[in-house]
């Protein structure tokens, strides 16, 4: 089985001074038994590249280069020291109108640059309430995850949109239902789908991490707010190590 993964998404937060938090985290988890991935803003990737953690971008363009002002390619992320990139985060889907086809193209660009794509999927509150969660997950998995996905080049992050940054968390049964469903779809479609890591994301904290990590098919977490401070992220890593 692949190692569990604790991933931090710093979003548009973090200046060079914030690297002190990572140095603290590094000292506390220098022999971690789980993988640790930090996705800082792109401006900090090269400053993080020699750290013990894996480093990821938060987005990439689907093209390798060209006239796309303000964008960053997967090759550029790799060149700066990244090994991973988030694709399809709900804030990209919402703020930038990214659809499943765009996310699949970005994930393919990640593979071409030898980056692991952390492909994010998840339902909105409206979709949860009208009972279409699993149908939404199916559509997003089919449209966002390329046929070339493998357990090595892809991690799936299930992030209910309504749980991101809100302090609201699905019940453990709801998390379990969606993760089991994703696992089934992955094993149906990919020969190594049983080994593809599935992260839960959405208001994970030290106080709820152990319960979430005990849910079957939860292979780790994608953490936003609680990944910014070593004191907040460290208990989540510790809970994953014990899971
Ligand atoms: C995220 O940004 O992917 C996320 C899950 O955020 P938070 O942990 O703050 O809900």
Image: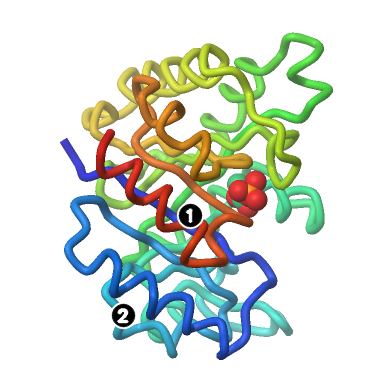
Q: Quadrant of the C terminus?
A: top left
Q: Position of residue 232 (x, y in %)?
A: 52, 57
Q: Is residue 62 at all visible to an observer of this figure? A: no
Q: Position of residue 134 (x, y in %)?
A: 60, 16
- Mark 2 or mark 1: which comes first in sequence? 2
The residue lying toward the viewer, choosing from 30 and 94, is 30
Q: On the image, which quarter does residue 167 sit in?
A: top right
Q: Is ligand 1 closer than 8 angstroms to the Cβ of mark 2?
A: no
Q: Is residue 36 at all visible to an observer of this figure? A: yes
- For the point 27% across and 42% down, the residue is 151
Q: Give the number of the mark in front: 2 or 1.
A: 2
- For the point 27% across and 64% down, the residue is 29
Q: How many discs appear?
A: 2
Residue carrying label 1:
107
- For the point 36% across and 47% down, the residue is 154
Judge whether 47 appears above or below 151 on screen.
Answer: below
- For the point 32% across and 73% down, the residue is 26
The residue lying toward the viewer, choosing from 130 and 6, is 6
Q: Measure how far apart labels 2 and 1 are at the Cα level.
A: 25 Å
The residue lying toward the viewer, choosing from 130 and 187, is 130
Horizontally, is 122 left or right of 194 in the view? right
Judge whether 96 appears above or below 157 on screen.
Answer: below
Q: On the image, which quarter does residue 196 sit in?
A: top left
User: Which mark identifies residue 35?
Assistant: none
Q: Secondary structure at mark 2?
A: loop
Horizontally, is 193 left or right of 226 in the view? left
User: Which mark identifies residue 51?
Assistant: 2
Q: Position of residue 181 (x, y in %)?
A: 46, 16
Q: On the image, which quarter does residue 23 sit in?
A: bottom left
């Amino acid at each position: 089985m692949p190692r569990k993964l604790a991933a931090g998404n710093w979003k548009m937060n973090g200046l060079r001074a914030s690297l002190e938090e990572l140095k603290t985290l590094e000292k506390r988890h220098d022999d971690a038994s789980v993988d640790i991935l930090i996705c800082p803003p792109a401006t900090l990737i090269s400053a993080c590249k020699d750290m013990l953690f894996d480093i990821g971008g938060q987005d990439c363009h689907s093209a390798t280069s060209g006239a796309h002002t303000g964008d960053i390619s997967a090759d550029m992320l790799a060149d700066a020291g990244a090994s991973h990139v988030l694709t399809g985060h709900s804030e990209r889907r919402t703020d930038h109108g990214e659809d499943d086809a765009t996310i699949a193209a970005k994930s393919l660009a990640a593979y071409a640059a030898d980056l692991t794509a952390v492909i994010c999927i998840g339902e909105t509150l409206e979709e949860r309430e009208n009972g279409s969660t699993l149908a939404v997950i199916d559509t997003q998995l089919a449209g966002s995850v390329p046929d070339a996905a493998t357990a090595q080049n892809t991690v799936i992050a299930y992030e209910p949109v309504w749980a991101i940054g809100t302090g609201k968390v699905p019940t453990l049964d709801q998390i379990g239902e969606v993760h089991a469903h994703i696992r089934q779809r992955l094993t149906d479609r990919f020969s190594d789908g049983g080994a593809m890591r599935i992260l839960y994301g959405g208001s994970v904290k030290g106080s709820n991490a152990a319960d979430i990590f005990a849910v079957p098919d939860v292979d780790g977490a994608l953490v936003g707010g609680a990944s910014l401070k070593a004191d907040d992220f460290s208990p989540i890593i510790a809970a994953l190590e014990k899971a």
